[in-house]
Image (tube, grey):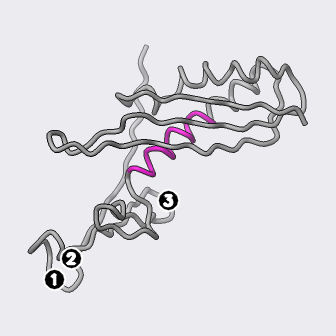
């Protein structure tokens, strides 16, 4: 049985000064992303594509979504299996390849979760990352490899 979930986002871009897209260098890549009942998120293009480095770019947000989804599944699975996690950190990294034919694509994302547990089996805690990866909604929706290199520490 499938169960649909609907997600909505609002994107707004304006041409400051009314210049608009008169040339590639003329327009700002800055825009805002909105979600019902949540603070607005300032976004832009990657600085390599004339974006504002102080704003989030779509590529960063994709890597963050993969990391976040994995963590949420992982914490659920640990709860189910009696493993008490007290700290979780990830330094996820994604590689995008620019390509003249397609524009570009992600080649790979690597998750590096560092987990601290206070009770439960450390080996099982490490193994649950595979199941979290298998169940992750976002990971199941991308067409590139997402690797996971976890470390588990007993506190």
Label 3: few (<14), some (14–19) or many (≥20) C-alpha neighbours in 10 Å: few
Residue at the left extreme of this rendering = 22
Q: Which residue does the numbered mark 1 point to in the structure image?
A: 18
Q: Is residue 133 left or right of residue 10?
A: right
Magenta stretch mostly in which secondary structure? helix
Look at 18% across and 73% down and name the residue there: 25
Q: Quadrant of residue 28?
A: bottom left
Q: Determine which residue is flagged by label 3.
A: 37
Compared with 133, 58 (above or below) is below
Q: Residue at x 14, y 40 (%)?
A: 101
The quarter holding residue 5 reads top left
Question: Image check: 6 left or right of 69?
Answer: left
| Image quadrant in which the N terminus is located | top left
Asked which quadrant contains residue 11, the reply is bottom left
Quarter of the C terminus within the rendering: top right
Mark 3 or mark 1: which comes first in sequence? Answer: 1
Q: Which residues are magenta?
A: 59-71
Residue under pointer 2: 15
For residue 15, above or below residue 98: below
């Amino acid at each position: 049985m499938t169960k649909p979930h609907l997600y909505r986002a609002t994107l707004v871009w304006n041409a400051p000064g009314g210049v608009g897209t008169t040339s590639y260098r003329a327009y700002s890549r800055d825009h805002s992303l909105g979600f019902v009942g949540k603070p607005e998120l300032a976004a832009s293009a990657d600085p390599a594509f004339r974006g504002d480095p102080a704003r989030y770019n779509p590529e960063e947000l994709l890597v963050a979504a993969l990391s976040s989804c994995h963590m949420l599944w992982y914490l659920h699975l640990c709860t189910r299996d009696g493993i008490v996690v007290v700290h979780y950190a990830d330094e996820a990294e994604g590689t995008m390849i620019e390509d003249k034919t397609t524009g570009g694509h992600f080649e790979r994302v690597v998750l590096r979760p560092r987990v601290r547990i206070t009770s439960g089996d450390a080996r099982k805690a490490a193994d649950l990352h595979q199941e979290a990866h298998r169940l992750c909604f976002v990971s199941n929706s991308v067409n590139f490899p997402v690797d996971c290199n976890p470390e588990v520490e007993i506190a």
